[in-house]
Image (cartoon, grey):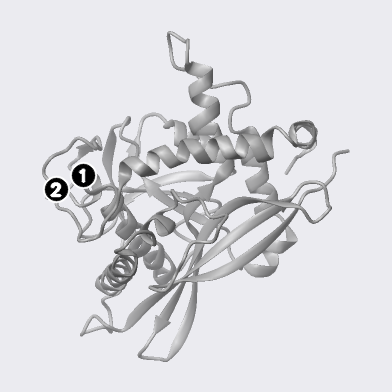
């Protein structure tokens, strides 16, 4: 029997006064916005974009489009491997909370949304490139993503998660530029038109090992579908306001980070292949350095290898071999 790992969470408000913690991945959407001389202006504008999008989608009984605002919490998850109180930063996700100003009510939103992981940085930015360095054809290493997936499932199944969050996580990401998506006849009032693809992307397969299935929807007045990774039934398990909280938050981030896809000047058609080389798009007024972000991912992956993968390799291998949901 392998020992059980323990998890601890910390919460911090994401607002215009947010400063990233020392162990926060600097490639993370919210952390990247909170750096540099324009940090506070970036944060203020991004939060306003989120509120505006929420009110546009939650338009019923909302004639002035100002009934709601979204509060965001950053949930940082640390893992204790040896049970000695020494932890490693494992996962960061976002928790939405919805403020209904008409009824003076605070409504709990979805946890997940953005997803940040040091181990994923290691898998994608260190392990995968090393494996393919001298390969004629792209492939993935044996058991690729298994450790990361089991750590995530262990967290979601833990007492810490169950004590803090009422529902399973939903993670919302960009669709893959390597795949073509086709529009279906299925339409949800909030999530919008559903898209499907013929084969899963590497990211889709990676998240499947985390116990998450994926569906792709293009919300009303959006220009590209979003990928929603979830457990259970995405359309039944969450309320419209919960889903709107996730859409408004993550679509805002994607407009900033992938404007070629999510701030394009024309909407996705019946068949759609995303591209970061698309030229007909608009920029937000928010400063962001995408090249720096990709360089930091490699540094963070190597940090994980040095401080987590190698020091705990035998323990991690034994745990992964014995862990079962």
Left or right: residue 26 versus residue 262 is right
Pointer 2: what residue?
Answer: 281
The residue at the point 26 percent across, 76 percent down is 59
- Residue 149 lies in what quarter of the image? top right
Pointer 1: what residue?
Answer: 260
Q: Position of residue 40 (x, y in %)?
A: 33, 70
Q: Position of residue 98 (x, y in %)?
A: 43, 77
Find numbered disc 2 in the image and state the secondary structure of the residue it sits on. loop
Find numbered disc 1 in the image and state the secondary structure of the residue it sits on. helix
In the current view of this chain or complex, which residue is farthest to the top? 136
Give the crowd class for mark 1: few <14, some 14-19, many >=20 residues within 10 Å: many
Q: Position of residue 277 (x, y in %)?
A: 20, 35
In the depicted view, which residue is nearer to us: 17 or 143?
17
In the image, residue 1 above or below residue 288: above
In the image, residue 271 above or below residue 133: below
Q: Are marks 2 and 1 in contact (CB under 8 Å)?
A: yes
């Amino acid at each position: 029997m392998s020992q059980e790992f323990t998890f601890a969470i910390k919460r911090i408000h994401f607002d215009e006064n947010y400063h990233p913690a020392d162990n926060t991945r600097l490639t993370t959407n919210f952390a990247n916005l909170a750096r540099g001389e324009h940090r506070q202006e970036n944060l203020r504008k991004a939060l306003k974009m989120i509120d505006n999008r929420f009110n546009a989608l939650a338009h019923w009984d909302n004639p002035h489009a100002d009934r709601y605002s979204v509060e965001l919490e950053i949930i940082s998850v640390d893992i204790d491997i040896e049970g000695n109180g020494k932890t490693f930063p494992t996962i960061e996700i976002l928790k939405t909370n919805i403020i209904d100003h008409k009824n003076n009510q605070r409504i709990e939103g979805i946890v997940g949304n953005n997803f940040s992981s040091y181990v994923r940085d290691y898998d994608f930015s260190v392990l995968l490139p090393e494996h393919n360095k001298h390969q004629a054809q792209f492939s993935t290493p044996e058991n690729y993503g298994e450790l990361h997936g089991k750590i995530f499932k262990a967290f979601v199944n833990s007492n810490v998660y169950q004590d803090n969050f009422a529902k399973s996580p939903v993670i919302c990401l960009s669709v893959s530029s390597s795949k073509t998506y086709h529009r279906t006849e299925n339409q949800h009032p909030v999530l919008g038109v559903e898209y499907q693809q013929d084969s899963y992307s590497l990211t889709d397969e990676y998240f499947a090992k985390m116990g998450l299935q994926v569906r792709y929807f293009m919300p009303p007045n959006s220009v590209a579908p979003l990928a929603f990774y979830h457990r259970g039934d995405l359309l039944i398990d969450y309320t419209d306001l919960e889903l709107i909280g996730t859409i408004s938050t993550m679509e805002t981030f994607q407009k900033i980070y992938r404007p070629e896809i999510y701030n394009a000047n024309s909407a996705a058609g019946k068949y759609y292949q995303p591209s970061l080389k698309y030229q007909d798009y608009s920029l937000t007024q928010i400063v962001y350095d995408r090249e720096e972000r990709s360089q930091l991912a490699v540094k963070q992956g190597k940090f994980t290898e040095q401080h987590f993968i190698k020091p705990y390799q035998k323990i991690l291998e034994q745990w992964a071999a014995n862990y079962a949901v």
